[in-house]
Structure formats: C-alpha cells, structure tokens
Image: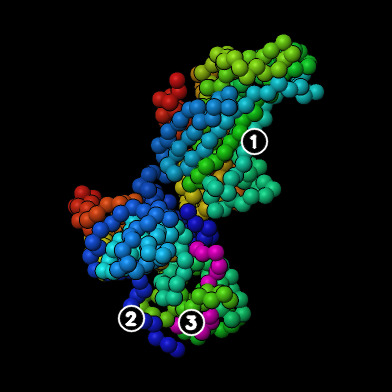
Amino acid sequence: MSSMGLSSLTYNTLSKMFAEGKRFDGRKLIEQRDFSVEYNVSNKAEGSARVRMGKTEVVVGIKLEVGTPYPDSMDKGNLMVSGDLLPLASPRFESGPPKFAAIELPRLIDRMIRESHVIDLKKLVITEGEKVWTVIIDIYPINDDGALIDAASIGAIAALLQTHIPALDKDCKIDHESKSTKKLPLLEDTIPLSFTFYKLGESLIIDPTREEEEACDGKIVWGISNWKGKEHMIHSCQKGLETAITRQNVDEMMKHLPKVYDDTLKKLKKFLK
Amino acid sequence: MKEFDKNEGEYEDFGSEPQSRVIVVPGEVVSSEEDFLPGEGARREGKDIVASRYGLAEKVGRVIKIIPFSGAFIPRRNNVIIGRVSDIVHSGWIVDIDYAQNGFLPLMESPRFVNKGEMDQFLAIGDVVAAKVWSVSPKGIDLAMKGKGLGKLEGGFIFRVNPSRVPRIIGREGSMINLIKVNTGCNITIGQNGWIWVKGNSLDSELKARKAIEFIADKVLVTGLTEKTEKWFGENK
C-alpha cells in the first residue's frame, strides 16, 4: 500500500457508496471478509496462531512465565497483552515510541479477554501468594488492510485454545525439555471476539479495508462472547474517533452484533481442533 | 513554455514484439553476447548484461530490459501522476505523489486566474489532481498541469495498484486500457505512480472498471493478457 493520505475524493465517494449500501469489494455493509487460521507459527511459544483476513494478517503468540502475583490479586494468575504495530505491516506505522493505535490494540484485546473471564486465572496459581503463571499474549500485525483489532481477537482466542502449560521442575523453573500436554484452563464454550463498527456519514460498516477505515469518522469496538455457550454477552466496548455515535446507531449495532458473532464463530470453529 | 514531447514516455510502450521472456534475479547474467545493449533494469559488466531488478528479462531488438515484478515509483520527466494536495504555500501547492519527495505545483499552472489569498478555491488540501512531472531535480519535483486530461479530478474515485503493473494495465499502445474503456464506458486516467482514477456514468460501471484493472494487476506472468481480459469481460457481464 502507499502512504498517501485520505483524499476528499475517496471520502466523498465512500460516503455516497455506503449510503447506497455498496462497497468496493462487493460486500454488504455488515459483512465480513473470509478468514483463515493457521497454528504453530512459532515453535518457541506455548501457543500461536496466524490469522489472514483478506489482506490483513496478524500473528499472535502466547508465552507462559512463572511470576509473582499482583498485590490486589494474590489468588490469581497474571494476564499481559502486548502489541506492536510493526513498520513492515503498513507505511502508516513508524518505529519509535508506541502511538495511540499501538496502545489501543493490546488494551482492547486485554479487556475483551479479561472481562470475558475466558482464562481461569484462579487456576493459574502455583503456590498461593508466591508463584503464579503469567500469560503473555503478543500481537504482531504482519500486514494491515483494516480491521486489525477484529483479526487480532480471532488470533488471540485461537492461540489461547492451543496453549499448553509447560512443565515445572522442583525449583519452580520451567522445564523446557519435557513436552507438556496440560492445557491452559479456559472457561468452557466461551469464545470472546471483538467486532468494530465504523461509522461514515449515517452508515455503519464492519470489517473495513484500510481504504475504508481511513475514511470513516467514528467507531465502536465491542467485545462479545457466547458466555458458557448460553447467551450472547457483551464484555467490553470502546468508542473511538471523532464523530458522535447516536442511540439509533447503537440500536442498529445491537441488531447486527449477535448475527455477526455467530457467523464468525461458525467460521472459526472450522479451524479449531 | 516548452512543449511536452509527443512520446508519452518509455513506460507506456512495450515497443516491438518481444522475442523471449525469462525470469531473472538481481546479479543474474542475462546474456553474454556483445550484440546486446542494457536497457531499463539491466547493466553491463564486462561482456555480460546483468540484471539489476527481479523481473522478466525481455529482448527487444538489440536491447535487453527488465520489467520488474515489484518496486516503488520513481518519477521521471513527462510521467503522468495522480497526487493529493497536501499543503498550500505562497507560490503554489504541495502535492503528495506517493514518492519519497513531494511534488510542487506552481500557481502559474492553474488554468484560470487564482487569487493568492483564495488558493483553496481552486485546489484545497485533500483534493486530487492529475499532473505531469515537469522536472526532477535535487531541489524537488516540479509538476505541470497543462495538457489533455490533466487538472483537478472531480467525481469518480481513485485507487492504487502496484506501480510496476502500470505498463501492463496500459498495454501495448494503450490496447488494454482501451479495452476496459470500451467495455465499461468509463473515463480512466492512469498515473505512473500506480494511482488510477475512474469516472463513469454509474457507480456499477466504475466498480467494474476497477475490478478489471485489479484483475490485470493480479496476473503478473500471464501471456496473452488482452485475450484473457476480453474473456473476463465476457464472463463478468
């Protein structure tokens, strides 16, 4: 892609197209691109996944380390999510201190996973009050063609479902030699995912390409799951960009969100082993 | 002011029918015969013609040139480009032309009189222009906007393909682009920097033109692409 900024021509065209319900790639406004998930991307990580969604590509790796619990949660393991917007992913990303988007991405994924309680952090205690497991989720966008947060959420949950807890030796050090088959304790039948609704003019779209994402002037990121395989449950949400989101907009999102979630879950289940 | 050459620049014409095409990597010896001359993307090292780019080596007459598979746009004089106005300064407009340097479009190039205080009446920040590269010098890239099809672009939309695909999209003597124009009824301006402007009577025809161009840009190694594109239009009525 290129580094040329958003032109007023593209902005006007997209506003007009969205109002007519059309998109450049022929999708409907509320329709996602197909995606694929690939496992064992990293052989050093405890779990890893690569998600390809259109031209967007994200690699997620999970490491487990032995750490000390935080003072306010002595009976729980730790969860850390970090993300890096690598300059290789897009001409928009520069190396240097993380900027807004680079802080927002891991935070939103962190909130989605933490608030859905999909990782049973209480089961990650090794010795009460002293040693616990720290789950580190690393997100690396390889190519940015829009909807990075949505793709990263798929990658994160796919990698978590693959994650093994490594074996420990007598001194509570990780034994890298022995292969462990113990899975990370996850809440059953709960798969949290993120969906971002973008707003341009009065139209709402999901899963934008980069071209569309840059033109949009409002967004909300939702974290939703089928909690314990029962009902849809929203765990997190965050509003972004400048434009106000109206009550009607939110009502419309709520109408689409369960269906969008179910569709994605169905596609994702094909890749889960 | 000097007139532009009639010739639209070397990119737009493949010349006579190529004799053979082989894939080469940088450093690869394409030919050791002394009869040949190095063209674009190739250089002479002693007796050999050596590739400087990764792409298709093509012998046209006595010249060996390489059509690269990828690569950035490098502006040359007389290239038509599509850029975005990124700033207004006292004597003209700064235009982002998707290159490491910005282009400069002087106030003089405006087709009508523009008051210095109201330059955004003609071109505001974010507007898209089709322009020609007037000169490339260490001081900067100067643009010109006097010519057929050049000027501020209004209506339609722009999108980008890999700049190295531009010659294919234009085709031999414009054959490919004319095929698309005839089949979609759209007005199409192709910038050498890979940005393409499409404007037609309806959004559907514009979208079809974009699809056709992206179809061509996808097919790097295909021969007889014009026929394949004709077939594509047959299938995608």
Rendering coords of residue B95 (x, y %): 53, 70
Chain ID for label 1? A
> Where B173 sits versus A141, above or below?
below
Q: Residue at x 43, y 69 (%)?
A: B81
**In the rendered structure, does residue A268 fall within the stretch colored magenta?**
no
Q: Quadrant of residue B42?
A: bottom left
* Pointer 2 residue: B6
What number of labels is visible? 3
Q: Residue at x 56, y 72 (%)?
A: B94
Q: Residue at x 35, y 64 (%)?
A: B65
Instruction: Please state the extent of the stretch shown in magenta in the rendering.
Output: B98-111
Q: Amino acid at mark 3?
A: Glu
Where residue A28 is drawn, which disc sits there?
A: none
Rendering coords of residue A106 (x, y %): 63, 37
Please say if the residues under marks 1 and 3 sit with CB atoms less than 8 Å apart. Answer: no
Rendering coords of residue B235 (x, y %): 20, 49
Q: Label 1: state its secondary structure.
A: strand
Q: What residue occupies the far top of the structure in this picture? A: A170
Where residue B109 is drawn, which disc sits there?
A: 3
Discs 2/3, front? 2
Q: Residues within 10 Å of mark 1 (few under 14, many from 20)?
A: some
* Pointer 1 residue: A82
**In the rendered structure, does residue B109 fall within the stretch colored magenta?**
yes
Q: Label 2: state its secondary structure.
A: loop
> Which quadrant would the N terminus of chain B be assigned to in this image?
bottom left
Q: Same chain, marks 2 and 3?
A: yes
Q: Amino acid at mark 1?
A: Ser
Chain ID for label 2? B
Q: Residues within 10 Å of mark 3 (few under 14, many from 20)?
A: some
Q: CA distance from mark 2 to mark 3?
A: 20 Å
Of residue B61 and residue A42, the one placed in the foreground of this image is: B61
